[in-house]
Amino acid sequence: MVNDNRTPPGLKPTVQSFILADHVYVDSQSGKKVIAGTFNRVALGVSQTALVPVYAYLALTNCRGHVEFYVRLIDLGDGNILHESARLRFEAQDPLHIYELVMELSPLPLPHEGSYALEACCNGETVGSVTIGVARRKRPGEQP
C-alpha cells in the first residue's frame, strides 16, 4: 500500500470557523488572535472594484499528513473564479488538533454588485465557504 502522507480517505478536513475581517492581530507572546471588523456584506464606492484590507481567520480540524490549503473567490452570478490566495502547506500529525490559519487576501476583486463566495480548499477539495454580499454606495443625490 502506498502512503502519500495525505489526509486518509474518509477523513475530510473540517472548517470549524471561517471569519472575514478588516484585520486579524496575532499576539506575539500568547499566539492569541484578535479578529477586528468582521463582515459578510460590504458597500463599495461607486468606482471601487476591490476590497482592501481583507483578512480571513480559519480554524481547521480532521487534518492528517500533508495539507495544502488555499482560499478562492467565486462570483456567484457566473461561477467564475476571481481570485486564489497563496497556498499554505503544513504537516498535520493529529487529526484532533485545531489548526488556526490567518490569511491576508487583499486586494479582493469585487467588480460589481451581487453575491460572492469565498471557498476554503484543502488538498484541492472545497471544505467550507462564506458568502459576501456586495452593494454600491449611491452618488450624492442619486435615487435608490
Image: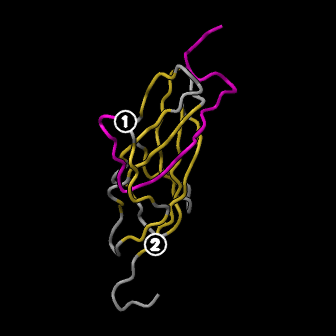
Q: From the image, which quarter does the N terminus lie in?
A: top right
Q: Secondary structure at mark 1?
A: loop
**Labels 1 & 2 near each other (Cβ < 8 A):** no
Residue appearing at x 56%, y 15% in the figure: 4
User: Where is 122 relative to 71, above or below?
Assistant: above
Say what amino acid the circle numbered 2 marks.
Answer: Ala
Q: Mark number for residue 5? A: none
User: Where is 71 relative to 42, above or below?
Assistant: above
**Coloring scheme used:** secondary structure
Q: Secondary structure at mark 2?
A: strand
136 falls in the magenta region: no
- State which region is magenta: 1-30
- Residue where numbered disc 2 is placed: 135
Q: Is residue 9 left or right of residue 102?
A: right
Residue appearing at x 44%, y 25% in the figure: 90
Choose between 121 and 104: the one closer to the eye. 104
Q: Position of residue 14 (x, y in %)?
A: 60, 37
Question: Who comes first in sequence, dot 1 or dot 2?
Answer: 1
- Residue where numbered disc 1 is placed: 31
Say what amino acid the circle numbered 1 marks.
Answer: Gly
Q: Is residue 111 left or right of residue 98?
A: left
